[in-house]
Amino acid sequence: MRIDAAEAPTLPDKITGALELTSSRLRSLSAGDFVDRRLFGPSVHLLNSQGKMLRPALVLLGALALGEDPYGYVDLAAALELLHTSSLIHDDLIDGDSKRRGTEAVHVKYGNDAAILAGDALMSKAIILSSQYGTEVISEISKSAMDMCAGEMLDSYCQKSTAAPTLAAYLRIASLKSASLIGVSASSVAVHRKNRLAPRLHAFGIDCGIAFQIRDDVLERVDGARAKLHRKEPNFVSVLRERDGLGEEGAMLKAVELNLKYIARAKKAIGGQRMTLLRSYADSICLCTT
């Protein structure tokens, strides 16, 4: 069976330029940004091998959809990526994963204590960067961080349990752990501008986040090299396999169906011409096809 990810859309120059500036902002962190310079290395370790920049892109695309200048939200985009990176550092430590983005996990290279503190430092830096956008934005970001902690705790208990979680239970884990920050990324500019579309953009982001996690779980099973590194259960494929008594291939096909359902829900939340680019981006980052 062949399962592929969708191709990325061509982004407007304003978005690609603002994304490049966001990357530059992240790379500009220096030892002087940390009270104890020993925190610098573990804090920027994963930033030096940047991932998909999904969350910054959603911040900037959300700004453009609302008629705002994306360049005015580079610091907010950087803050969301810092918070995401913080969660990856802690997640790798909790799960005992040794690799991330093709390099050593932070706790492997620098030790557990440094990894915990680096994650905390990046979270604090994210709050500092986002503070210029007002207390409501900080509140939404902080709620998302609380959600991620709750999702991580639920996921940890599920991994230790001998009973497979229900699909509803695992959807809740994904919503809290993975999708919460994506929801805030999509809606943060609307929250800052007190725009009435904020709840719809947040719902769009949550459903995108769930679809993205399903896609990641499916593609991980297809990619043998990734599967060896991250053969963690439960995941969406294993949950569907247990629920429906399916083989591996049948469970993956069911997961693809679920992926398509959540993408459709996400796109339905944000109708209208000015949201076209956001809907196209949802397909590119979330869709897996057979």
Image (cartoon, helix red, strand yellow):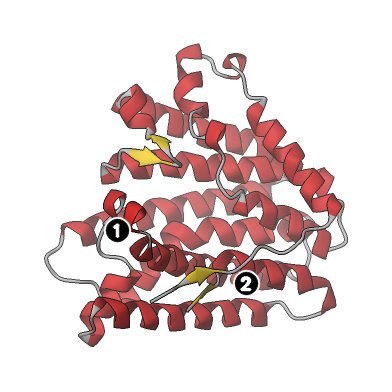
Q: Hey, what amino acid is under mark 1?
A: Asp
Q: Badge 1, how many Cα within 10 Å: few under 14, some, many 20+?
A: many
For the residue pair 187 and 237, the one nearer the viewer reads as 237
State the count of labels.
2
Q: Which residue is mark 2?
A: 283
The image shows residue 187, relative to residue 127, as above or below, that is below
Q: Secondary structure at mark 2?
A: helix
Residue 36 shows up from this direction: no
Could you say where residue 4 lies in the image, as x and y percent from the top left? Answer: 50, 69
Q: Residue at x 82, y 59 (%)?
A: 64
The image shows residue 22, relative to residue 190, as above or below, that is above
Q: Which residue is mark 1?
A: 155
Q: Secondary structure at mark 1?
A: helix
Could you say where residue 35 lies in the image, as x and y percent from the top left? Answer: 53, 15
Q: Residue at x 32, y 25 (%)?
A: 113
Write down the quadrant of residue 93 in the picture: top left
Residue 105 shows up from this direction: yes
Q: Residue at x 74, y 60 (%)?
A: 62
Question: Of all residues shown, which one is farthest toward the bottom?
Answer: 244
Q: Is residue 146 left or right of residue 167?
A: right
Q: Is residue 49 left or right of residue 57?
A: left
Could you say where residue 73 lies in the image, as x and y percent from the top left? Answer: 77, 46
Q: Hey, what amino acid is under mark 2?
A: Asp
Which quarter of the image is occupied by the N terminus?
bottom left
Question: Of all residues shown, which one is farthest toward the front?
Answer: 1
